[in-house]
Amino acid sequence: MSVIKFENSRNKMVQIYGRPPFLLESIDGLGDVDSDFQSQKTPYQDGVDYIDSILQERPIPITFVILADNPNDLSLKKRLVSEVFNPKHGLGKMTYNFYGREYEIEAGSEHVPSFPSGVSNRGVTYQRVMVDLIAPDPYWKEPRQVSRSLRAYQGKFKLPFKFPVEFGIKGDTTNLYNSGDTDAPITIDIEGPIKRPQIINETTGRRLIVNRSLSEGEVLHIDTNPLKKRVEIYRDGEMLEKAMGYIDHYSDFFQLATGGNEIKFIADEGSMNAIVAISWRNRFTGI
C-alpha cells in the first residue's frame, strides 16, 4: 500500500493513503523526470561530443479524495489541505512509503490545491483534490542518514545535529559504500583537538583541507551539498563561527561516488585523539 505524508515548512501535515479521510487515487513523478542532454560540436564533425546529462526538477502530481463525516467536517478538512499545500510556505518534506520502503524528497506546491466541481468530484461529504508538487532537487533520498566514524569510538562527541552514528570503524582509512544511483553529498564532523585536518577520497582523488586548529570540544561541521554548502564551528551544540574561509584553495567539496569510496583521514597534529564522522543519504533517480 502507498502512503504519502507531506509536511510543510510550518510543521502542518497531511497523510494520504488507502482509506479515509484522505484517500489516494493517483500519484505520478516517482520515476519520470526530464533530462537536459548537454553536448558540444566542432565544425565538420559528425554527431556531437557528449558532456553530461542534467536532471531537471521533478513534478509530482497527486490526486486524492477527502471523505468526511458531515459537511462541516468536509469544510475543515478542505481548509487543512489548503493550509498544508499553500505554495507561499515554500518547500516542505514529502515522504513516500510503499509496502515498508520509505523515501523522502523536498517539494513545494506549484499552485493552491484544486477542488474540482461536478457530481463525480464533489458532494456533501466528499471532495476530489488535485495537488501539483515540484521538487527542485529531483533525487529521492532514504530518510535515514548513513553515518560512519573514521577515528575513535570513545570521547565526548557533541554533534551540532542529531543523527545515529555507528562508531564501529576505527582507523585512518576506511571504505564507504554509496548504494544510490548518483553521487551523494556528505557531511563531515570533526571534534578536536586537532591541527589542519584533511579528508581525502582516495577513489576519486579529491580532498578537503581545513587550515585551522580545533581545540578540545570544538566541532567542525562541513556540508558538501552544492545547494546547502557550509562550513561551521560549534561548541556544546552552539555555533561559534562560520568557517568557509579556512578551507584550503586546493580543496574540493567532494561527494561520494556510487559504489565504494576509500576515505583517508590525516592531520598535521592530533589525528589520534580527534573524532571524525562522515554522513550521507543514498539518492535515487526513481523509486
Image (cartoon, grey):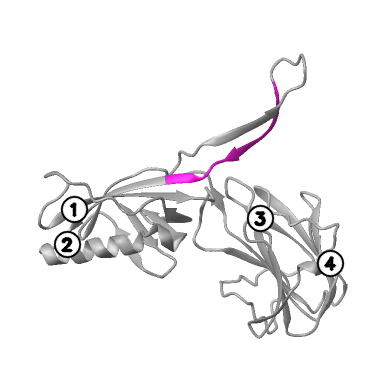
Cα gap from disc 1 to disc 2, whole angstroms: 8 Å
Of callouts 2 and 3, the N-terminal one: 2
Q: For numbered disc 2, what is the local secondary structure?
A: helix
Residue at mark 2 to residue at mark 3: CA–CA distance: 43 Å
Magenta span has 281?
Answer: no
Image point 25% across, 64% down: which residue? 79
- What segment carries the magenta color? 48-59
Magenta segment, prevailing SS (helix, strand or loop): strand
In the drawing, does residue 96 fall left or right of residue 261?
Answer: left
The three-letter code of the residue at mark 4 reads Ile
Give the foreground label among 2 and 4.
2
Amino acid type, mark 3: Pro
- Which element is circle 3 on? loop
Q: Quadrant of residue 216?
A: bottom right
Where is 21 relative to 114, above or below?
Answer: below
Residues at marks 1 and 2 touching, judged by CB atoms closer than 8 Å: yes
For disc 4, the marked residue is 266
Marks 1 and 4 in Cβ contact (< 8 Å): no
Q: Going by the image, does 249 lie left or right of 27?
A: right
Q: Amino acid at mark 1?
A: Gln
Point out which mark residue 127 bears: 1
Q: Which residue is mark 3?
A: 226
Q: Mark 1: which secondary structure?
A: strand
Inspect the magenta stretch and tell me whether residue 57 lies in it.
yes
Residue 74: which disc?
2
Closer to the N terminus: mark 3 or mark 1?
A: 1
